[in-house]
Image (tube, rainbow, N blue to C red):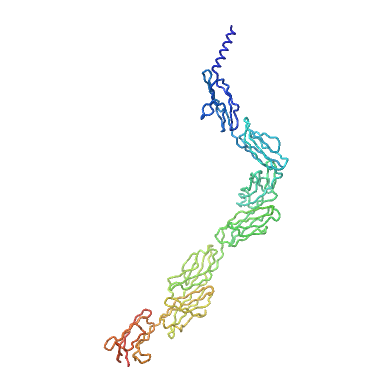
């Protein structure tokens, strides 16, 4: 009886679980690469089963889904059985994985070996196909680099594929490689010294490199590298600091592959230490001649640079010094020496440190040259000269007749104005240059001073002081005659020994005679000097006859004056009775002895004359004369 009761209870329990079944599902794959398609199998036994794959889509009765984006996803199932519902949510149930290109580095080694270093951190492992028919190798994440030997020659397609475990998927990257037999010999392009110092020196090197190899720079005969770096596909510039560059620093280069093989440069690359010293009027350059090991005949030249401009080329490899005389005091000069080496298979340049100095000089500069002077205006004298342009002149000092006159900046002429040119003036000039060195006074320059002597026989007499200049150069004099507008209308050439002149050809039509001396210093260059202007004033002349005889066919048939230098004139003639019988403003028109168209009677007549000379002086005269018939 007890056995029958137990079986009945067991049967009722089974029937109860079928009526109230729980949600249940499984995926065919729960981890894989995007895009990942997942198919679900229902194990709930219910009806109206639906699934929710994402919040945006809601519940669907579809039992599969594709995930295009990497990430972790939840799936929820709902189901019914006998009117009773149930649900099941599996969080982070599906993991969709990204497929990045696997990260690895391939380096060529000597003897056709290759080093492969897989640095990828995404995949649990990578599959390596060397491309030469050998078996595919599986490499777990974080494993040491692999080495592989290629027995043949030519190019190979190396493939590395990422692999998820579990998942069994991933991206692949192929690389075409060309194994090499020998390491390339390292070649340095240039060395440039930046700082010359026994302990804190610095240089910059330029080295042709390849990305497959590492490089070491070390001092010749020293096993300890000064610098280590990874190559690139081209030139690497590298600074090396805190070294001794006071003496010639010589370097060697080593190429290293990832398989433990190395190759050392045959050449020894050195830099050239340069020292520059400022001395009086020059800069002295000294250097250590190049002492490195380079191919025979490779040396081409030393090129010396001053302020970044090449100024000297030397072809003697053993030369070790040079004097630069083309310097200006207080100027800063920076020098560098560069050695060039070249053969069909070897090219190298090494540059010294750049050294800068300030030049100085104590040399006394020469006196000013070609100092001359000329009268510029009736009250001024112009000085002009030449001087050395280098070193730059900062100040001129000028003295007139021994007294300091003025200080000027960098000019080469002076107009000494507001003078009373009543004597000879002499000038001296000196200058100071930028080096604070002062030239001596130049020998005096004294422009010609012209003055009048007492007239002799009514003829103007002139004398003048000799023209004097530091060059002691004078070709002769020219006496110039000037009109009222100060224009030259006549010139008389005189020898340099002549210092006086009498003008025996003085013009009678000029009341004022103006003279000037032109000193011919250098005719070929039109260098001349003018003196002051001297004026001679001749007295006006006005003479009236005491009688005249009209119509006598002689020179005395009209009454008019004889005159010199009269500019304005008025003549009035009166009869004895005081009647005006003749009047004129023309000094050349005289009275012909007629009055009102008839001959005037012989008698005594009076005249009154007013005149003004060419200097503006006015005068008048009156007297009587006799008309004779």
Residue 313 image offset from top left, x and y in percent: 64, 59
Residue 388 image offset from top left, x and y in percent: 54, 66
Residue 290 vs 535, above or below: the answer is above
Q: Is residue 502 left or right of residue 10?
A: left
The quarter of the picture where residue 595 lies is bottom left
Q: Is residue 217 left or right of residue 396?
A: right
Residue 13 image offset from top left, x and y in percent: 56, 14
The quarter of the picture where residue 173 lies is top right
The quadrant of the picture occupied by the N terminus is: top right
Residue extending farthest bottom: 629
Residue 576 image offset from top left, x and y in percent: 27, 89
The quarter of the picture where residue 609 lies is bottom left
Residue extending farthest top: 1
Count of labels shown? 0
- Residue 240 in sight from this viewpoint: no
- Residue 144 in sight from this viewpoint: yes
Residue 52 vs 523, above or below: the answer is above
The quadrant of the picture occupied by the C terminus is: bottom left
Residue 577 vs 197, above or below: the answer is below
Residue at 57% x, 8% y is 5
Q: Nearer the viewer, residue 514 or 279?
A: 514
Residue 509 vs 3, above or below: the answer is below
Residue extending farthest left: 577
């Amino acid at each position: 009886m007890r056995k029958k009761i137990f079986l009945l209870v067991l049967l009722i329990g089974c029937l109860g679980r079928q009526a109230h079944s729980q949600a249940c599902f499984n995926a065919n794959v729960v981890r894989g690469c995007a895009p990942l398609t997942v198919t679900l199998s229902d194990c709930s036994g219910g009806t109206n089963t639906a699934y929710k794959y994402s919040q945006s889509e809601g519940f669907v009765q579809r039992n599969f889904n594709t995930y295009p984006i990497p990430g972790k996803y939840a799936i929820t199932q709902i189901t019914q059985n006998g009117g009773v519902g149930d649900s099941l949510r599996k969080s982070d149930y599906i993991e969709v994985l990204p497929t990045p290109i696997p990260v690895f580095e391939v380096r060529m080694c000597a003897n056709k070996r290759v080093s492969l270093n897989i640095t990828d951190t995404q995949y649990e492992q990578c599959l390596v196909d060397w491309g030469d028919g050998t078996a595919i190798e599986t490499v777990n994440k974080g494993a040491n680099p692999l080495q592989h030997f290629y027995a043949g020659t030519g190019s190979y397609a190396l493939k590395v594929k990422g692999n998820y475990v579990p998942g069994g998927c991933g991206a692949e990257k192929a690389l075409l490689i060309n194994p090499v037999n020998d390491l390339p010999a390292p070649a340095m392009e240039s060395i440039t010294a930046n700082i010359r110092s026994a302990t804190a020196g610095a240089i910059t090197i330029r080295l042709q490199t390849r990305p497959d190899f590492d490089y070491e720079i070390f001092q010749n005969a020293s096993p300890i590298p000064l610098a280590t770096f990874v190559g690139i596909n081209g030139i690497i510039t590298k600074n090396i600091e805190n070294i001794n560059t006071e003496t010639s620093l010589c370097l060697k280069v080593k190429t290293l592959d990832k398989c433990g093989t190395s190759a050392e440069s045959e050449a020894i690359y050195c830099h050239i230490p340069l020292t520059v010293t400022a001395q009086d009027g020059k800069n002295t350059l000294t250097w250590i001649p190049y002492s490195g090991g380079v191919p025979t005949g490779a040396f081409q030249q030393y090129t010396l640079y001053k302020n970044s401009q090449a100024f000297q080329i030397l072809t003697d490899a053993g030369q070790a010094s040079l004097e630069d005389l083309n310097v200006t005091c207080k100027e800063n000069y920076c020098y560098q020496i560069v050695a060039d080496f070249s053969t069909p298979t070897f090219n190298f340049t090494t540059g010294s440190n750049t050294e800068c100095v300030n030049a100085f000089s104590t040399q006394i500069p020469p006196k000013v040259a070609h100092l001359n002077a000329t009268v510029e205006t009736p009250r001024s004298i112009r000085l002009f000269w030449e001087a050395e342009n280098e070193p730059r002149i900062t100040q001129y000092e000028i003295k007139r007749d021994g007294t300091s006159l003025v200080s000027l900046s960098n000019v080469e002429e002076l107009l000494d104005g507001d003078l009373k040119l009543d004597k000879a003036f002499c000038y001296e000039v000196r200058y100071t240059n930028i080096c604070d060195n002062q030239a001596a006074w130049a020998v005096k320059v004294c422009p010609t001073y012209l003055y009048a002597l007492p007239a002799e026989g009514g003829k103007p007499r002139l004398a003048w002081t000799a023209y004097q200049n530091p060059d002691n150069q004078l070709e002769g004099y020219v006496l110039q005659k000037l009109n009222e507008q100060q224009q030259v209308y006549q010139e008389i050439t005189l020898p340099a020994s002549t210092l006086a002149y009498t003008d025996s050809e003085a013009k009678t039509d000029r009341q004022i005679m103006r003279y000037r001396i032109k000193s011919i210093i250098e005719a070929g260059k039109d260098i001349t000097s003018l003196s002051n202007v001297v004026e001679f004033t001749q007295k006006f002349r006005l003479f009236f006859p005491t009688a005249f005889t009209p119509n006598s066919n002689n020179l005395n048939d009209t009454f008019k004056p004889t005159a010199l230098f009269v500019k304005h004139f008025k003549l009035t003639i009166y009869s004895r009775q005081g009647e005006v019988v003749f009047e004129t403003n023309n000094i050349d028109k005289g009275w012909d002895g007629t009055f009102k168209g008839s001959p005037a009677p012989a008698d005594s007549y009076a005249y009154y004359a007013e005149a003004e000379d060419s200097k503006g002086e006015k005068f008048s005269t009156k007297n009587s004369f006799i008309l004779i018939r």
